[in-house]
Image: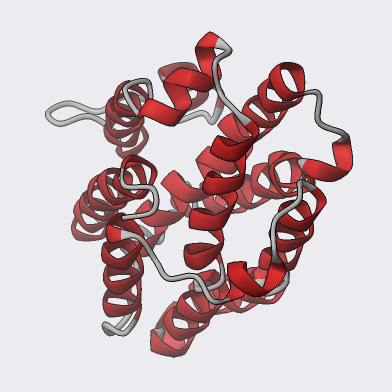
Amino acid sequence: MSSTTTVAAGIAPEDGAGTLFERLAEVWVELEDRLDRVPILQRLADGTVTLEDYRRLLFNLRQQVVDGSPWISRAASSFDIEHFELRAAAIRHAEEEHRDYLMLERDYVAIGGSLEELRRGRKNIGSEALSAYMFHYAGQPNPVGLLGAMFIIEGLGAKRAAGWAARFQEVLGLADSQVHFMRYHQDADAAHTGDMEAILTSGIIDDRDADDIVRCAQVVARLYALQLEELDR
């Protein structure tokens, strides 16, 4: 999210540390810079990426994606009635995402991967850390800070996934049916990002919540990049 998005949302800049959106934009810029240094994404950008690289990426992502709906469901159960809107949003989100890993599995098989081997796979170092953090945070009372996690994860789907898919297709000659998971998330995560922005601008987020959201975004940005850096480890 850029400062342009902040203005478009009708949020006036504040004194001091700036608005929540501006602080999140800084986290996003740091993430983009780190992603540009991830080896597999560098190879994707310069056109030297291989089919095996893409297969490894899907293999590693699947082990974390399968945990997505469960930690969102845990978060939903951790919100009390005073946070009804957030609980309801989390329930809807978990329902929408609980089959996402099946799309990824189909893409993996479509490029020659073994479904049995994929399902026997284990999380890499970064995915272990990311999933552990998400489940721990989701179990805390009223985990409002997880909106920062959603800012990062849904933002990657909305802003980067389709571009990655198109580049894999361009370099490797892949069909749409082989990059469906990434292409799907452009539209789906854009809708989720819109829902999240509505919550962030609704007036229910106080200063302490904002600090928690930014901190969670920082941690998740680092751990998400780490799982891309540590493929197969």
Residue at image coords 39%, 87%: 78
Q: Looking at the image, can residue 78 be seen?
A: yes
Left or right placement of residue 37 versus residue 85 in this view: left
Q: How is the image coloured?
A: secondary structure
Q: Position of residue 190 (x, y in %)?
A: 66, 42
At 79% across and 46% down in the image, what residue appears? Answer: 180
Q: Position of residue 214 (x, y in %)?
A: 25, 47
Q: Quadrant of residue 42?
A: top left
Does 72 appear above or below 156? below
Let me know if residue 1 appears in the view: no
Quarter occupied by residue 13: top left
Choose between 3 and 96: the one closer to the eye: 96
How many circles with numbers are drawn on the protein?
0
Horizontal side of 10 relative to 54 (left or right) equals left
- At horizontal 74% and vertical 67% (from top left) the residue drawn is 102
x, y percent for residue 110 = 82, 51
Residue located at (17% from left, 26% from top): 15
Find residue 202 and report its horizontal and vertical position in percent: 49, 53
Which of 167/197 is in front? 167
**Position above or below: 221 against 98:** above
Front residue of 91 and 82: 91
Q: Could you say which is closer to the camera, residue 144 or residue 162?
A: 162
Q: Residue furthest left?
A: 16
Quadrant for the C terminus in the image: bottom left
**Looking at this rendering, what residue extends furthest in the top direction?**
46
- Image quarter of residue 161: top right
